[in-house]
């Protein structure tokens, strides 16, 4: 049973994190209907997140290789006194903008009383015995995806990532990660496309952000976990998660290329409406 749990959980987490349907929202829905409101972390969940990061990294290894090369070349230019921000290539600027997204995340460590930190405070709403906030998160994603679809219908060319858009996306990363019901892929890809960024660059931005986020989440979950798994189950969870993430991330590229985002908007509208209505009844009753 533990191995079957690892297999299905790995596939489910990979699908809901990478596709624009919110892993955190589905997790909150599952825990709510199962009457599990503790929100404690599991070693298996952490291992699966690390496996997902590995799968995405392999699927888009060229993107990360390019980022690494630009990162190394930046240090080389600094030490050889050839560093010029204004004349940086688009690849170099993309690397800068990706790193910039992690600056607001430092605010997660701000103390928040009994909850511990600002991140833990925001995350606590995922297990508050009410689905209204998750429903709102799903509905926000639905609207963003639909707007992105209409934007792509008008023009698929798009532009390079600019500093103002990078600042906006960095703030959205900060808001989205701890808020249940919001999908990192839906929010980042939609916001970038709506802001006029090329759809392929929008996808690469999400991919570049997702791997470090998954690695950090996985490590934190393993360190703070209260439930453990045996080594065989853990290995299977990592391998299945990596394989699932590899194929699902490739599928996401096809979905964006063929402009299928509207179908995920419909899905988010449906799930979001059900969750929001359920949450309202939970408040009343």
Image (cartoon, helix red, strand yellow):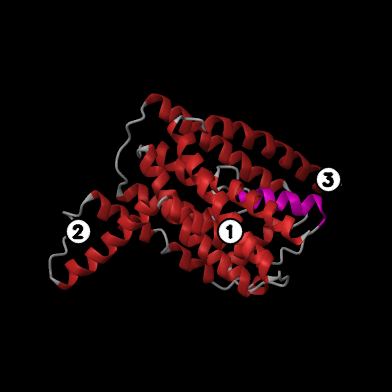
How far across and down, in percent of the image, does residue 157 sit?
Answer: 32, 31
Q: Is residue 165 above or below residue 110?
A: above
Work out whether residue 35 or residue 67 is closer to the camera in this orientation and state it: 67
Q: Is residue 281 above or below residue 173?
A: above
Mark closer to the chain start, 2 or 1: 2
Tag shown at residue 239: 1
Tag shown at residue 284: 3
Work out whether residue 8 or residue 120 is closer to the camera in this orientation and state it: 8
Side of 115 relative to 101 (left or right): right
Q: Do the CB atoms of the residues marked 2 and 3 lie less than 8 Å apart?
A: no
How far across and down, in percent of the image, does residue 10 sit?
Answer: 64, 54
Q: Is residue 96 above or below residue 142?
A: below
Mark closer to the chain start, 2 or 3: 2
Q: Do the CB atoms of the residues marked 2 and 1 lie less than 8 Å apart?
A: no
How far across and down, in percent of the image, does residue 167 sit?
Answer: 37, 53
Q: Is residue 198 visible to the viewer in this orientation of the structure?
A: yes
The residue where tag 2 is placed is: 85
Q: At numbered mark 1, what does the secondary structure look like: helix, strand or loop?
A: helix
**Outermost residue, left side:** 81
């Amino acid at each position: 049973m533990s191995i079957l749990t690892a297999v299905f959980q790995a596939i489910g987490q990979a699908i809901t994190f990478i596709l624009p349907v919110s892993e955190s929202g589905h997790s909150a829905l599952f825990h709510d209907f199962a009457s599990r409101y503790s929100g404690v972390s599991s070693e298996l969940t952490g291992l699966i997140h690390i496996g997902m990061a590995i799968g995405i990294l392999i699927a888009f290894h060229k993107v990360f290789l390019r980022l690494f090369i630009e990162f190394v070349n930046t240090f080389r230019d600094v030490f050889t006194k050839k560093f010029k921000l204004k004349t940086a290539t688009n690849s170099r600027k993309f690397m800068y903008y990706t790193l910039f997204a992690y600056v607001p995340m430092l605010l997660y460590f701000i103390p928040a009383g009994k909850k511990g930190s600002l991140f833990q405070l925001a995350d606590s709403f995922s297990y508050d015995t009410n689905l209204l906030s998750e429903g709102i998160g799903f509905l926000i994603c639905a609207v963003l995806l639909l707007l992105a679809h209409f934007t792509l219908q008008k023009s698929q060319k798009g532009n390079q990532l600019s500093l103002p858009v990078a600042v906006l996306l960095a703030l959205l990363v900060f808001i989205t990660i701890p808020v249940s019901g919001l999908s990192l892929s839906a929010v980042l890809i939609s916001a970038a496309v709506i802001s006029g960024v090329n759809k392929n660059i929008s996808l690469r931005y999400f991919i570049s952000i997702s791997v470090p986020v998954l690695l950090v989440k996985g490590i934190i979950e393993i360190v703070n976990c209260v439930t453990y798994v045996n080594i065989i189950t853990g290995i299977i969870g990592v391998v299945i998660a990596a394989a699932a993430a590899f194929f699902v991330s490739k599928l996401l590229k096809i979905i964006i290329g063929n402009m299928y985002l509207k179908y995920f908007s419909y899905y988010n509208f449906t799930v979001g409406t059900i969750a929001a209505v359920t949450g309202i009844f939970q408040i009343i009753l």
